[in-house]
Amino acid sequence: MIPAEQLEAGLAELGLTLPESARRQMATYLAVLQKWNRVYNLTAVRDAGQMVSHHLLDSLAALPYVIGGRVADVGSGGGFPGLPFAIARPDWRFTLIDSNHKKCTFLRQAVIELALANVEIVAERVEQYRPATAFDTVVSRAFSDIPAFLELAGHLVAPQGILIAMKGVYPKEELAQVPAGYTTRDVIRLQVPGLKATRHLVVLAKA
């Protein structure tokens, strides 16, 4: 199955409807990622089909749980989940944060090639970043364990906002170490089309 057909099938399985323009942007993103990956080693995944399942659909599976119009992606790396989110929600604002300047160079180029007007790239350590306005959702995927995520990025979330940690297996030990001042709202098991690995979404908030 070619990635375009795989993406269509995956979106249908997730119940997400995207316009043709957004689906084209997803394909362009995949092409840009593959091109830059040869030099910048943005992801260990090399196969285009695996990129669809492991990155695009894995990101989009979390989208229904994101709230509000201002979203921060902490430790964005190759742009996951921030760029798939931004393509799917052009009316929301996304800030992608990463301390690796090479990765931020890629992210800025991807934003240009995808013509995304709703994305800001911040090349800074997340704990040092002080935005003028807090975020409705702060999300991380493969950034750190949950206690460190909350310690480093907790200041970014608005009082009524949420923090989302995208995880593999059920993170029992990490959940037992959620620091005072935070509460675990929900742990959701995700079914990602084409991905056999276990995925969980941990939704947290300030207590």
Image (cartoon, rainbow, N blue to C red):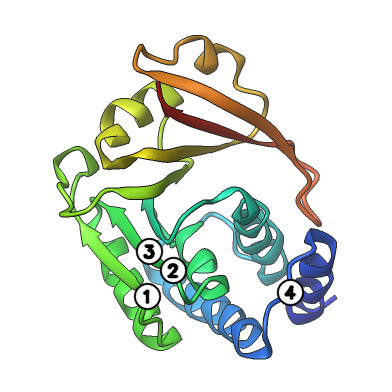
Q: Residue at x 73, y 74 (%)?
A: 17
Percent position (x, y) of residue 78? Answer: 43, 61
Is residue 75 in view from this perspective? no
Q: Residue at x 29, y 54 (%)?
A: 97
Percent position (x, y) of residue 77? Answer: 39, 55
Is residue 73 in view from this perspective? yes
Residue linked to disc 2: 92
Labelled disc at residue 118: 1
Q: Are marks 1 and 3 in contact (CB under 8 Å)?
A: yes
Which of disc 3 and disc 1 is earlier in sequence?
Answer: 3
Mark-to-mark CA distance, 1 and 3: 6 Å
Q: Residue at x 29, y 53 (%)?
A: 98
**Relative to 188, is 196 above or below?**
below
Instruction: Name the front one of labels 3 and 2.
Output: 2
Q: Secondary structure at mark 2?
A: loop
Mark-to-mark CA distance, 1 and 4: 19 Å
Labelled disc at residue 17: 4
**Relative to 123, is 84 above or below?**
below
Mark-to-mark CA distance, 1 and 2: 7 Å
Which of disc 3 and disc 4 is earlier in sequence?
Answer: 4
Residue linked to disc 3: 94
